[in-house]
Amino acid sequence: MPDSVASPSVTPLRRFFAAVVQWFDSDYTPGGAERMRNEPDKVDWVRCIPFIVLHAGCLGIIWVGASAFAVWSAVVLYVVRMFAVTGIYHRYFSHKTYSTSRFGQFLLAIWGGTTVQRGGLWWAYHHRHHHQHSDQPEDAHSPHVHGFWWSHIGWITSRRNFPTDYSTIKDLAKYPELVWLNRFDTVVPVLFALSIFGLGAALETWAPGLGTDRWQMLVWGFFVSTTFLFHGTSCINSMAHLMGRRRFNTTDDSRNSFILAIICLGEGWHNNHHRYQSCTRNGFYWWEIDITYYGLKLLSWTGLIWGLKPVPKSIMEEAARADHLATIAAAQRASTGNLDAATLKKVVPAAAAIAVATATASESNLPKKSEGPGIHKNVAELTHDQKPADQPKAGK
Ligand SMILES: [Zn+2]
Ligand SMILES: [Zn+2]
């Protein structure tokens, strides 16, 4: 990590006001975005106040109570928006695993904005960086390097991780409408929250039999659902490199976990994904449930998206061999009772217990970059300006 380059000219007061402005304009970086990114990791408490308010808002259930409609709304909005995180921010903006029109891309970006996980360009920048430096010191959210809590929630509060590095996502940054949504990344979440509040008000008037109201809908549909959505997504950062089985001998410690695949609609097949990032599906077999892929398939039938990319035959052949080897390795390890939990030292006890219980087929040490198969380079290629999103509709 680079040494601190904080300038003595940036006073605490100036930094305070800059953080407040950044609530509304995430590209406001008076000292320069590059300098911010080179600072050491440190929680920016002022910048994080909206994030803290999001969590505190869940306590509103004490005052507003619950109704079946409000609780089910929270569940449905979790699923619909987890799909946006995985199917849009991840499989489209980060990896371009399918195509859409420019207008379709804009609609997807707005849908993604309702997740309250900052802008799609910020998300894609960090995610591509994760693939390029997985479980290495530069990886912003590796549980092996930074510990469980930092990888789960700490890294997103760190001042150095706030600015978007547009130079690494040129294929997206060339669209001003996407840059605008990324820069003013509170606009969509605020409109989304107001819409839920308005829906609650309408139901209060027109459907009193449902027993809900505007404040109850706001608390359950926005605060509770969004907070669960954040922590569900974060489980991939904190757990998907600790918990589950490894099919492919990738250069990181990514794993496949059924539990995480359910929580995150298919993202739990993380080892598959680290081995090959350019296909639309993360579950490579029919039994690897990948709800996001099923949703994207449905969406492709509407014509909004097309060109879903399959898993290459060579990868499936490698998977067949790798699965066999993993089974042998697991059997050998089970027979000797040699479960190595050394990599879990920094994990909280509960997470460690889950991880140890499910890590029977895992590698105990991270392979060096030079040992594993060459990682798929598509992320690196995407950082350079490539074809526009609105390619001719083909290859459906
Ligand atoms: Zn990815
Ligand atoms: Zn990963």
Image (tube, rainbow, N blue to C red):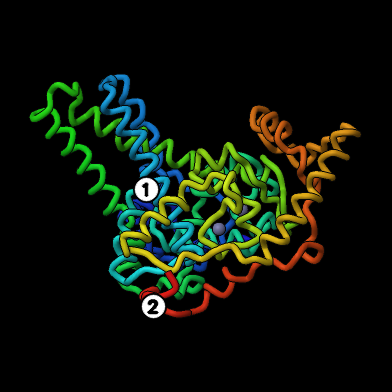
**Residue 43 visible in this rendered orientation of the protein:** no
Say whether residue 198 is left or right of residue 289.
left
Q: Nearer the viewer, mark 2 or mark 1?
A: 2
User: What separation in Å lies between label 2 and label 1 (alpha carbons)?
Assistant: 27 Å
* Amino acid type of the residue tagged 2 in the rendering: Gln
Which residue is rendered at x = 79% and y = 47% of the image? 326
Q: In this view of the protein, which residue sits in the foreground, 287 or 139?
A: 287
Q: Quadrant of residue 163?
A: bottom left
> Could you tell me residue 157's position as x and y percent?
49, 47
Q: Secondary structure at mark 2?
A: loop
Q: Which residue is mark 1?
A: 115
Which residue is rendered at x = 38% and y = 78% of the image? 391
> Could you tell me residue 76's position as x and y percent?
34, 37
Q: Quadrant of residue 75?
A: top left
Q: In this view of the protein, which residue sits in the foreground, 24 or 80?
A: 80
Which image quadrant shows ligand 1?
bottom right
Q: Which residue is mark 2?
A: 391
**Residue 173 visible in this rendered orientation of the protein:** yes
